[in-house]
Image (cartoon, rainbow, N blue to C red):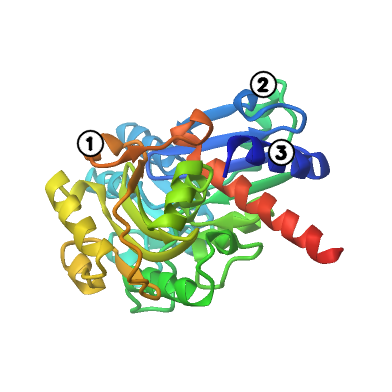
Amino acid sequence: MEQAEAEALFQACLERTGPVLCLDIGTGTQDVLLALPGSCVENWPKFVLPSPAVLVERALARLASEGRDVWLCGQNMGGGFAGAALALIRKGHNLCATSSAATALHNDPDRVRAMGIEIVETCPAGFVPLALGDFDLANWQTLLAAHHLPMPNLVLAAVQDHGFHGKGSGNRRVRMARYASLLAQNPDPVSWLFDVPPLEMTRMRAVHLASGGPVADTATAVLLGALLDPVFVRRSFREGVTFVNVGNGHVFAALVYKGLVRGIYEHHTSMRTREELLADLGEFRRGFLPCDVVQQSGGHGTAYGPVFEEASYEPTFICGPGRAMLAGCGQFIAPFGSMMLAGSLGLLLAWCVRQKQQGQGAQ
């Protein structure tokens, strides 16, 4: 999409909606955009802040150093603080959690108990309560008020959600099965922004209940942000493209043909060397990389849609804070000049496109 076209779409939507807070909540950072009517994209407030999981990790480390016992409360969220939780226990301190907070560490309560964490619904005497959650309205009210910025009328958020289909279900398999279902039902990533997330997407649902707004996966959000690059879109229609986001925790790749998603690949950034990732991507774009092979090397897997033999997917577009890993292997992209805000801009794009479609359908 051309920048002028996207700007006009955003402004038309914001004039009706008012300020929109867009949150792309990743492993290490949460990348934040406050979209304001009457102001150009370049002038919108932007923040790259530590992710909520990083803040919990730091709080647990501090409490461990103080010799405190901790009670985790609140909601499901990103579980990147598990190492700090286990470190607190290894130091001889007690850690317990409510049943809802425990799901941030694992969906199976028996697995949580096996870590040495007791599940209790009220705070034991002498324990320090530590609230979990990917979205806290009070925090945003404080931050925005400190900068004399308006509160949003809508919150759009993205988190990575493995999904949960009951005790014993493998998180990675659930996640890739979900991708396969999306590719089969509707490969347009705009449709992957959920007004109400599916029941099995427990982390998304927790964010949705806290924020009240639509939610998407972080991988979906950054892919949507790539659609704001006009060269990316044109080449996807001509020959198909490979999109790669090298994040702090995960590598996500997608095959995109004629603006639609035809394949998904996910791995952990720390588990792939440059050479291994390039080999994976080569097999992936040819449709020769099975899900099980990726999972055997520690990754999430692959999922494929219909095969289009005329699509080469050779042009490669790269985004993410770890993009230097693939320097020289494709074109770096940064929608509206903000690479770290690609996911937040992608959320806004999906929302505005849907608003436009719904408006046209009502006429």
Disc 1 from disc 2: Cα separation: 42 Å
Residue tagged by mark 2?
146
Q: Amino acid at mark 2?
A: Ala
Q: Is residue 11 above or below residue 199?
A: above
Tell me the quarter of the image containing the N terminus: top right
Q: Residue 70 placed where, x, y %?
A: 41, 46
Residue tagged by mark 3?
8
Q: Quadrant of residue 66?
A: top left
Residue 328's tag is 1
Disc 3 from disc 1: Cα separation: 33 Å
Q: Classify residue 19 as left or right of residue 1.
A: right
Disc on the earlier residue, 3 or 1: 3
Please name the residue shown 21% across and 46% down the image: 270
Disc 3 from disc 2: Cα separation: 30 Å
Residue at the top extreme?
147
Please name the residue shown 46% across and 51% down the image: 223
Q: Is residue 280 visible?
A: yes
Q: Residue 23 placed where, x, y %?
A: 56, 42
Q: Residue 230 placed where, x, y %?
A: 51, 42
- The kind of secondary structure element at disc 1 is loop
Disc on the earlier residue, 3 or 2: 3
Please name the residue shown 38% across and 57% down the image: 239
Observer-nearest residue: 346 or 126? Answer: 346
